[in-house]
Image (cartoon, rainbow, N blue to C red):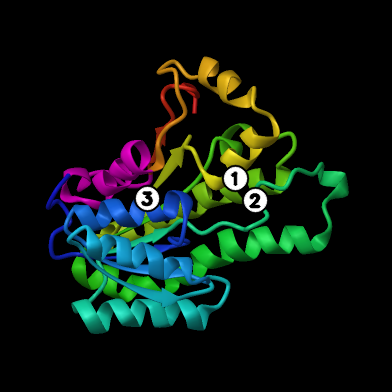
């Protein structure tokens, strides 16, 4: 994928760790000028890693629940790179892996999920559109199998991930005539939350692997991020409103 994003400004939310960091690193390796957006200092570490790898990156502290923060992140891309070509909304609630049945979900947990995933997507879309329209860019959102088949113990996470699919499809219809594409990626990847879950239940890794035809859980940097780079590149210029499931065949009916 080297060079496929050359000369393009890419903003990645939630890029301080996990899948978001992997996406940012891959975009940097593909030649993109990456704006790493995260609410904590680990975003600076992601930016430094991209630069150390020979790429172009900068970090801005950004809480996606704040329209002002997202607006400043877009301004950074425009000021430093002349515009914004790709907006990738990856941020999710820090409580996204917190199990709870819906009857036990308090309003603060519900609001936290909605504010980061959905309101954050709204802020990203509203602030990025003028530049994406000008440069014929694209927007990418991260969904999940939980948003397509539901989740027994993560019902709110499933709700917001499903809502993101509806949001992306509506945007794809609205923005298509303006030359802006909108797609989603549904990954199955090793994340900090999954590592913690496996630490609590060591047998979980084998159970997951047995359910995946390719025999393993995906690596965020080498399995998931390249698919995101593909959708952001001209190789996907005729793809919009779609969900690319990158999960080793775990879910074949999504």
Locate residue 203, reporting x and y percent. 64, 22
Q: Residues within 10 Å of mark 3 (few under 14, many from 20)?
A: many
Locate residue 246, reporting x and y percent. 40, 33
Which residue shows up at 45% across the image and 62% down it?
Answer: 16
The CA distance from mark 1 to mark 2 is 9 Å
Which residue shows up at 48% across the image and 71% down it?
Answer: 41
Q: Residues within 10 Å of mark 2 (few under 14, many from 20)?
A: some
Quarter in which the N terminus is drawn: top left
Circles 1 and 2: CB distance less than 8 Å?
Answer: yes
User: Where does label 1 land, which residue?
Assistant: 193
The CA distance from mark 2 to mark 3 is 18 Å
Asked if residue 193 lies in the magenta stretch, the reply is: no
Residue 96 badge:
2
Q: Residues within 10 Å of mark 1 (few under 14, many from 20)?
A: some
Q: Which residues are magenta?
A: 221-241
User: Where does label 3 land, which residue?
Assistant: 22
For residue 125, which quarter of the picture? bottom left
Q: Among all residues in the image, which is located at the extreme right? A: 103
Q: Main secondary structure of the magenta part?
A: helix
Q: Earlier in the sequence, mark 1 or mark 2?
A: 2
């Amino acid at each position: 994928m080297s060079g496929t994003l050359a000369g393009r400004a890419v903003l990645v939310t939630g890029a301080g760790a996990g899948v978001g960091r992997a996406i940012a690193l891959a975009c940097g390796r593909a030649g993109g000028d990456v704006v790493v957006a995260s609410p904590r200092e680990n975003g600076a570490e992601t930016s430094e890693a991209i630069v150390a790898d020979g790429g172009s990156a900068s970090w801005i502290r950004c809480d996606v629940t704040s329209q002002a923060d997202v607006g400043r992140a877009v301004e950074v891309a425009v000021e430093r790179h002349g515009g914004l070509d790709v907006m990738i909304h990856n941020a999710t609630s820090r409580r996204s892996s917190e199990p709870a049945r819906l009857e036990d979900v308090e309003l603060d947990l519900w609001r936290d999920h909605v504010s980061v995933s959905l309101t954050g997507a709204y802020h990203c879309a509203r602030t990025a559109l003028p530049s994406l329209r000008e440069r014929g860019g694209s927007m990418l959102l991260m969904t999940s199998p939980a948003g397509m088949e539901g989740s027994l113990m993560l019902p709110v996470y499933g709700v917001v991930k499903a809502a993101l699919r509806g949001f992306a499809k509506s945007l794809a219809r609205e923005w298509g005539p303006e030359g802006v594409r909108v797609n989603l990626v549904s990954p199955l990847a090793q994340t900090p939350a999954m590592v913690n879950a496996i630490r609590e239940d060591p047998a979980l890794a084998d159970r997951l692997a047995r359910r995946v035809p390719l025999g393993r859980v995906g690596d965020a940097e080498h399995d998931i991020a390249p698919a995101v780079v593909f959708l952001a590149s001209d190789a996907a210029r005729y793809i919009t409103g779609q969900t690319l499931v990158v999960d080793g065949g775990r879910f074949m009916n999504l």
